[in-house]
Image: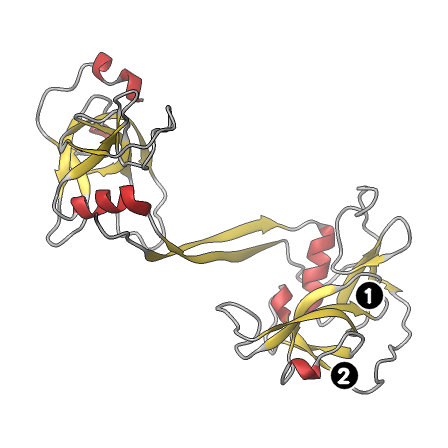
Amino acid sequence: MADILSAPLVVEFPFTRSLGPVQSAFLTGLRERTVLGVTAGDGRVVVPPAEYDPVTAEEIRELVEVGTAGTVTTWAWNPTPRRGQPLATPFAWVLVRLDGADTALLHALDAPGPEAVRTGMRVRIRWAAERTGAITDIACFEPDESTGDVGRTREPVAHDGRFPDALTGITTPARLDYTYSPGAAQSRYIQALADRRTLGERCPACRKVYVPPRGACPTCGVATGTQVEVGPRGTVTTFCIVNIKARNLDIEVPYVYAHIALDGADLALHARIGGIPYDQVRMGLRVEPAWTEGARYPDHYRPTGEPDADYDSYKELI
């Protein structure tokens, strides 16, 4: 049996959103070293501020300024910081109820070790040297020993939420790092591609051949243990024209991404179409894989020069 493959995989994209008046005021306030909360219908001060009451779901906009010091309500030690976390050295995740607030804010506490952290301890904000209007404008919290475990009494102060050059939107990078294992069926498929062969698997019940294989028939739910070599040629069943250049993808736009039904397969796979102007790609176009030297998979599919396939021969695979 072929070895089961695995590889690190990263899913990453920038998430862009517009800001309403509450979030705009909160993030712009952080840039100006001001922490704002919002007063809920029951009088509680919510920090970070919510746009809707967490109890009644009614819209709330009554902004107030709270303190920059507070009390740890609970915590957990993080011995091994990961990429993108607030601190590069071990730290504590803490929920901090800032003076004047009734809810707690999650952030990092810079402490020498777990023995230096306790529920009820006083902490204060350490501001980032450069602030842009993001939660990272709070670099972290740090211990505040000026009052022991007795918090300062501070009433929230009404705030109009107005700042010069207020933020109207933010872009936040989203990233997920993990190790992907394709399993036995797809491992065989990937290893066959390195030999310029395409393997599918046949369902013993309905006799359909699936490419790429998943190890089980999606229709019958039974194991597909029989390997079948398909292609290499196939038929474009449907396609789209891509006009937005993907990050870290060295392909000029526009280009075509298509569903291709390989000869002998009962499921279409996706691939890029090359070797033909994008506006000449069509349903029924006969194509074959194009390989680059040393590649483990086809770079793209190109026209074979054969007559187009009849619609009835691929209509069930669209």
Q: Is residue 93 above or below residue 235?
A: below
The earlier-in-sequence mark between 1 and 2 is 1
Residue type marked 1: Glu
Q: Position of residue 2 (x, y in %)?
A: 21, 49
Q: Position of residue 285 (x, y in %)?
A: 18, 24
Tell me which residue sits at (29%, 20%) in the image.
Answer: 206
Q: Nearer the viewer, mark 1 or mark 2?
A: 2
Residue designated by label 2: 144
Tell me which residue sits at (33%, 47%) in the image.
Answer: 182
Nearest to the observer: residue 201 or residue 306: 201
Residue type marked 2: Asp
Nearest to the observer: residue 312 or residue 8: 8
Name the quadrant containing residue 151: bottom right
In the rendered structure, find residue 251 and report the number of the disc placed on it: none
Q: Residue furthest bottom?
A: 146
Tell me which residue sits at (91%, 54%) in the image.
Answer: 43
Q: Are marks 1 and 2 in contact (CB under 8 Å)?
A: no
In the rendered structure, find residue 65 and report the number of the disc placed on it: 1
Tell me: 82 left or right of 54. left
Q: Label 1's element? A: strand
Q: Position of residue 279 (x, y in %)?
A: 24, 30
Nearest to the observer: residue 236 or residue 2: 2
Q: Is residue 87 above or below residue 102?
A: below
